[in-house]
Image (tube, rainbow, N blue to C red):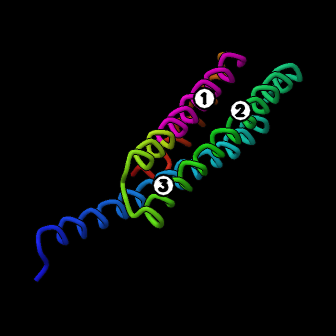
Amino acid sequence: MMGPGRTFLAMLVVTVLAAAAAGWAGVQYGLGRANGETDLDAAIHHDLHLTPEQDRRIHTLEADLATTRLELQAKMRAANRDIAQAITERHSYDAQAQEAVERLHAAMSALQEKTIRHVLAIRALLTPEQARDFDAKVSKALNAGTS
């Protein structure tokens, strides 16, 4: 039979591993959803009958988001490395691990916010008819798999 200290340590290790797995899964899901944006962007360019000026301005918005996305994904990977180090080397959910989780959440949140602002910036460039079609595409993309 294990003593109280060993039981606590075992539960702590299980909790940290579960939290790391959940964090990793969340990042993978978020990155997968971000990649789905590419499909939405492609549909926008093909289905909304953009003017050359709209197309140019949207490409500029997409380039800006792509740069931001790469920066934030790099921050997420760095935070995940630090979390992995806490688990595999220090075997501890210490202050460094907690800070890494906070950095991971901040980067994920920033990416989501930037993506929403990106979608709204595109919508602002559209005619009312294009905006209706765009809204339908955004709704479909965001509701995919929620049934």
User: Residue 120 in magenta?
Assistant: yes
Q: CA distance from mark 1 to mark 3?
A: 24 Å
Image disc number at residue 41: none
Q: Which residue is mark 1?
A: 114
Q: CA distance from mark 3 to mark 2?
A: 26 Å
Circle nearer the viewer, 3 or 2: 3
Looking at the picture, does residue 55 appear above or below residue 142?
above
Looking at the picture, does residue 65 appear above or below residue 12?
above
Q: Which residue is mark 3?
A: 83
At label 2, counting other C-alpha atoms closer than 10 Å, the crowd grade (few under 14, some 14-19, many 20 or more) is some
Magenta span = 105-127
Name the residue nearer the viewer: 145 or 70: 70
Where, by quadrant of the figure, is residue 86 drawn? bottom left
Q: Residue at x 81, y 30 (%)?
A: 59
Q: Earlier in the sequence, mark 1 or mark 3?
A: 3
What SS does tag 3 mark?
Answer: helix
Left or right placement of residue 56 versus residue 99 in this view: right
Circle nearer the viewer, 1 or 3: 3
What SS does tag 1 mark?
Answer: helix
